[in-house]
Image: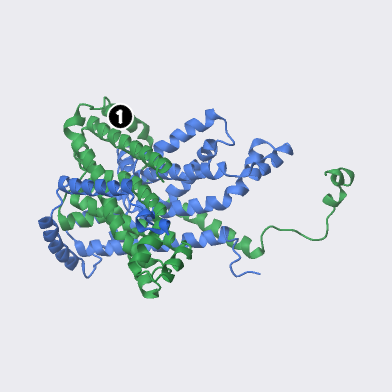
Chain colours: A blue, B green
Amino acid sequence: MDRLRPDTRPAPWPADWPARLGWLALAAYVIYAVARLDVNLPRIVSGLDNGARFIGRMLPPRIAQPDSLIKGLTESMEIAILASALGILLALPIGLAAARNLMPAWATWPARAVIAAARSFHPVIVAIVFVKAVGFGAMAGIGALVVASIGFIGKLFAEAIEEISLKQVEGVRATGASFMNVIIFGVMPQVFGRFIGFATYQLDSNLRNSTMVGIVGAGGIGGTLFSAFQRFDYDFVAAILLSIIAMIMVGEVLAGLVRRVFVGHGRVDDE
Amino acid sequence: MNAPITRDPAPLARPSGRHWQRFTPRERLMRFAVYLVVVAAIVASARTVEVIPEFLLDAPEQVHDLLQRMWPIAWSYYPGGVHDALMDTLHIASLGTLIALVMALPIGLAAAPNVVPSRVVNFVARLLLVSSQSVNSLVWALLFVAVFGPGALAGTLAIAFRSVGFVGKLFGEALEETPRGPLEALEATGAPWLARLRWGWWPQVKPAFWSIALFRWDINVRESAVLGLVGAGGIGMVLDSAMNLFQWTRVAMVLAAIFAVVVVAEVIVTQVRKRVL
């Protein structure tokens, strides 16, 4: 009976002092950050007041300039499609060169550096540089999103290739196939399904970002949106936002369709 | 093993009368349709997109000019003009992520059908998550600047509202994959709902939750650097004013600072992941 005395039994959930200290540190950080960023109650209260007025002015949405809305949306779509096509085309060889199981170190290091550099800046910042290089307009947006696509697809493609089974590659190599044939018949079939996944995801992501690069003058609907904000045309802002969301949702549905055709072998209702 | 092939290669070469194909005709037709649409979309976009060839031709010259103007990088501008804004950016990203975590917990719980067995609640929660995600963080920033005025508050809320969808969706998915065992044990002891949540669900999803939080914080550090372009505080505002004044050496300084912070954030995330999670 001695061992059942309550004070000798270990607690079922022992106090976790490191975790408690962690929570305390987190609370202290929140107080410090809130003070530093000047977040205080009066501002939030007056903001909520503003917010109600703001929403009131957004409703009902009104298409003030249908021409510039349609032109902006089509330009965004064109930017997304061309940037995805070019970006994927450029990302494939770079991603292949970055795969450490197929390529020697002198090829993987530069390719990895290119991918890391392409990933480190937000597309909108890259767009600023492209606006300076090729002037205002869709061309700058395409350039910025090509860079973003190279970073994303290149990284994931390299990772996908590093995970393939080398048995099939060896099998193709044993037949005396050339390097290109090894890639086409040994590597590509193993990564094609995942590649379709990345590509459709990238198209989706480019479509989202192509609506934003216009804020720095790189073409697309973003410019129209930003100027509507600056003119306080909030009902037009609401209309633009709704049409952007609609466009992105249609894009998502289409991307899902393409994934079903390729990855689900298209036989959803076959056989 | 390879004896049959060397002895009698004929069966391989002989036409068997059956025609083997990898895909059904319907599969091939659908694939062909996708290829056709993709090519058509690319061609149509390339033909109608507005490109000014003269601008494209002198791009190398312009880039050369840009790099020349950016050099030498104005390092001396860092202590006076960049440091505070850079720290603000980090705080916007961190505080925004924390607010998002607090908001994502209940919404993620409500989105998981095995936690809240109500179709209506699940649907409403999913709708909230999707609408948070379908608006870009720059658009959230524009909205909050219009509501709260320019400054870090707008940026923090923009990061928070954009991240809720991301964190909540992944958190909800983690909850859905949790095994029932510990929960049934707790239910059998008569534990109330809150205790089940605390001792049944939370220990099982805790690692996933912190991993999602870290992942999103890394993304938010990148995103918070651009919010200043629309007036939502942080280093983007310094970048914006330096660009508007054509002070390219300062722009280079800001870009270098952003690059350094992004690299440091990535190193922190990989280290924390390796050691703690």
- Residue B68 in sight: yes
Side of A51 relative to B216 (left or right): left
- Tell me residue A96's x, y (percent): 54, 39
Q: Say how many tags the image has.
A: 1
Residue B157 placement (x, y as % from top left): 23, 54
Q: Is residue A71 above or below residue A139?
A: below
Question: How far across and down, in percent of the image, does residue A144 sit?
Answer: 37, 43
Viewer-proximal residue, B119 or A128? B119
Q: Is residue A223 shown to the viewer in this render?
A: no
Task: Tell me if residue B79 comes above or below residue B110 in the rendering.
Answer: above
Specify the quadrant of the image occupied by residue A103: top right
Q: Nearer the viewer, residue B61 or B194?
A: B194
Q: Nearer the viewer, residue B238 or B243?
A: B238
In the displayed image of the protein, which residue is found farthest to the front? Answer: A1
Residue displayed at 38% across by 36% down = B57
Residue B162 sits in quarter: bottom left
The vertical placement of A19 against B130, above or below, is: above
Which quadrant, please, contains the N terminus of chain B?
top right
Q: Amino acid at mark 1?
A: Asp
- Position of residue B45 relative to residue A161, above or below, is below
Near-viewer residue (B34 or A50): A50
Kindly indicate the quadrant of the structure image that contains residue B148: bottom left
Q: Where does label 1 land, which residue?
A: B65
The percent position of residue B52, horizontal first and vertical second, equals 36, 43
**Residue placed at 47% from the left, 48% from the top?**
A85
Q: Residue at x 43, y 41 (%)?
A: B274
Residue at figure coordinates x 35%, y 61% from the top left = B198
Label 1: chain letter = B
- Which structural element holds mark 1? helix
